[in-house]
Amino acid sequence: MLSEKSLKAIAFERSKYPQEESRSALLAALRIAQEEQGYLRDELIEYVAEILGLPAIQAFEVATFYTMYDLKPVGRHKLCVCGSVSCFLNGSDRIIGHLSRTLGIGLGETTADGLFTLQEVECLGACKDAPMMQLGDRYYENLTPESLDALIAQLRGGSEDVR
Amino acid sequence: MLHIEIDGQQVEVAAGTTIMEAAESLGIYIPFFCYHPKLSVAANCRMCLVDVEKAPKPLPACATPVSDGMKIATASRKAKMAQQGVLEFLLINHPLDCPICDQGGECPLQDITMGFANPHSHYNEEKRVVEDKDIGPLITTEMTRCIQCTRCVRFGQEIGGIKELGATGRGEHMAIGTYVAKAVKSELSGNMIDLCPVGALTSKPFRYKARSWELKHTPGICPHCSTGCNTDVQSLGKEVLRVLPRNNEAVNEQWICDKGRYAYTGLNAPDRVTKPLLRDSQGKWTEVSWAEALEATLAGLEKVLARHGADKLAGLISGQSSNEELFLFQALLRGLGSPHVDHRLHQQDFRADAAMPLYPALNMSLEELEREPLIVLCHGFTRHQQPLTNHRLHKAVLNGGKVVSIDSMRQDFNFPVTQMVAGAGEDLALYQQLAGHFAHVHEEKQSDGLVDLAREMAAADNPLILIGSALLHHPQAADLLAQVESIAELAGGRIGWLADESNSAGAWLSGCVPQRAPGGHLLAEPGLPAGACWNAEMQGFILFGVEPGVDSLAGAQAVQRLRDAEFVLSISHFGNEARQYADVILPMAAFAEGSGSYVNNEGRCQSFRAAVKLPGEARPGWKILRVLGDSLKLPDFQYNELSEVSAAWHHAVGDYGMDIPPFHAFPALEAVQPIPAGALLRLGDWPIYQGDPLVRRAKPLSTPLVARMHPDQARQSGIQGEAVEVSSASGKVTLALDLDTHIPLGCIWIPLGYPETSGLAAPYLPCSVAMAALLPETQRAS
């Protein structure tokens, strides 16, 4: 179900922890599985649990807890807007509303062209520049409708590296 | 020791004590939901927040260990604010549907809200709704009421061995469930109902039946296995409405298994007899008065005695009968001159009878089991046969002990067990090999499961060997017992018995075995054991609480003999089977309707009282026996009160030890027919919910009848599809088939205890299988 390379990476993560603590490697193992396959199907979660010798429910608990794990297919760009206290007070609802209108999708949905997925996530620890969102492995802060429009235009234009 | 102060009271506690435990020792109540003394600490409900001096925030009492000089206030302004705040948050999403909630009246959330909450809430928005889960046939879920205390999840993981239940999602989306729809299958699942502090998990059979404050509570003893769990039988009027565990740390702690919890639902089965029944010469059954029924009984018995002599009369009694019933039963039979008294319908090999102990005793307390470093289970699947004794074994494993099972198939334990599985019919050979390995445990270098086991047993200090119920069901039980004894000797270990039925111990002590009188005194002229009665031309039978067609290993043979006999009296709760062969059926008090006492596996004598009135004209078993004895003019049957019978029982049985020799000297064992090699063997035992007349009739517990076979064996036998026709010398039947790698090659596993399979050959006898067409609808639905 997973490539040799991913299995090796999971085995490496597993080796960091004591014999009886395979649960500790679960976060990393799920991340590796998601990176390879794009999202975590039920069978994939069960498979990861099996590799680590854990009851499947423990992997499901973790996979459903963290918003970083995707349980459904996602688009090319995943817009993860923080909705926790600081961002909320600074207008994250307005940001989400703007994105939703611009892209024509609701939270948790993906655009028909498969380009964008919109998500609301818990605090990402960048409160001083709220409201903010994560895209790929990068943070975008002090968001405004204008900065978002510019960003989306760039992404639609095929740009990968946007600043 | 640490000195602390709680609410102004000084107390000294050991290091590591939590605030909750310290407060409990002072009798100070701190409200909580998720804390439970038998489970790990989660500290996720936050209800037990208390005010600790110098701590900036309130701390959870359940998870905070005390430190020297700590000053704790449980009712200060800060603590109260915290409690009110937590409750307000918990009630944000909890529906206020107490009037239609089964938990109402026994709900910690209700009580604590009344005691600690601020009557006003700031919350005016919508409440969340959570989809209900189907987590099995016994528990109703109402997940919107869940407050995510995770007691059920922790119970599943730490005690029940349920690995499918968890808390998925986060924050407002968190829900308890199985994620992928899956029924939770555990013999302990009902305990989650007791643990749930709200109405999220409630009992399905009890749903909307009554409010907790309307129920009458009667202390009971569970009649379904030899653990002897203490129960609280709750009834309303004439009906038992539910059975809950009663705390007894020494026996069942605070748990009972689902068999003990739900078997009561069988009490009102359609074939319950509540009036004496008499069969006329045309074979028609009519309800008659007690006087008529007794007259017919006496006439029938006297005819058998006059025509064939007392040697052709046999008495078989259930191992679930009370001491008082067992005692009177053997006195009745022996008073009539018949030596054939037995309770061991589950047994077929009686050659080791002389070696049997005074009674099947565990030879230790249940609590001591938890501390055993090495336990070897011999043909005992405790998870289904003695579920709460099994829990002690589970705890032994959690305490670092090891459990090894020797059996004829792989069993599905709920904790790690090293399993040694015999090949088809090679159980005896397996024990012989194990015994053989002791001679050279030190030299052999090879690592084979059995050699390792021998080595471990030899190295262990006094390992514990437990003789399981299924060992006695084996056709070579005597040889197996002899092997177990020699293995114990070679290993320098102790032997404990896991008694087969709830009062097997009492039956042995009361003299309901053909070779011993009450108190275990040897009889000069022993009678025939249960299994031998079926082919000894018996003409009269007195049956007490048994259904030999499904309770004995040779069901078809038993029913045939009973049909051919001249007179059969069945003193019984249910009539379906007895109507096939009996002449008179006398209705008897069932579970919760009679009083008496049981001796559990430890040798602990526990008594119980009737919880509800008798249905119809049913009478307590001991009274029926007393009237019969009295009418037959037997001496010593003039009892008026149960206490007089109990006193007579105590007097006759005398003081017995809880720690007794596990075996007397073995007699020379005559060879029995070997188990045929090469043929396909039928394996089988009584499944957890088929073991006695009451539990068989409990609808919520009923499990479909399926045969099980190893997939490779099925391929080899040319079986495809989901049904199989099994034929044996004594009959054939078509069954649903499950492929199961737990079953050894060369065998097909077919459960006992179902009328459908009672015509088949006994376990370990050959049978043949053929592909079968789709099952008739009726059977598939069952």
Image (cartoon, coloured by chain):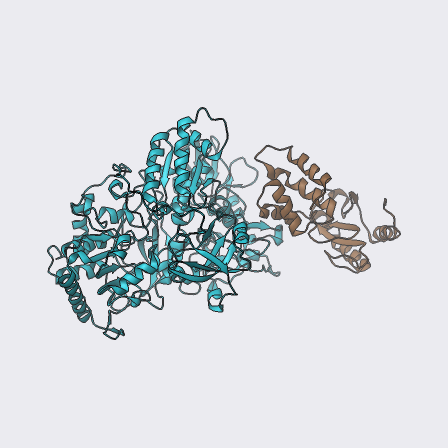
Number of marks in picture: 0
In the image as oriented, which residue stretches furthest toward the right?
A: A157
Residue at screen point 88% across, 50% down: A158
Decide if residue B436 is in sight here: yes
Give the image location of residue B102, x and y in percent: 45, 61
Compare residues B521 and B697 and report the one nearer the observer.
Answer: B521
Q: Quadrant of the N terminus of chain B?
A: top left
Q: Is residue B439 above or below residue B368?
A: above
Q: Which one of the lettered chains is coloured cyan? A: B
Decide if residue B587 is in sight here: no
Q: Is residue B312 above or below residue A1?
A: below
Q: Which one of the lettered chains is coloured brown? A: A
Q: In which quarter of the view is residue A112 placed?
A: bottom right
Give the image location of residue B607, x and y in percent: 26, 51
Give the image location of residue A21, x and y in percent: 58, 36
**Left/right of residue B622 with respect to residue A21 in the rendered view:** left
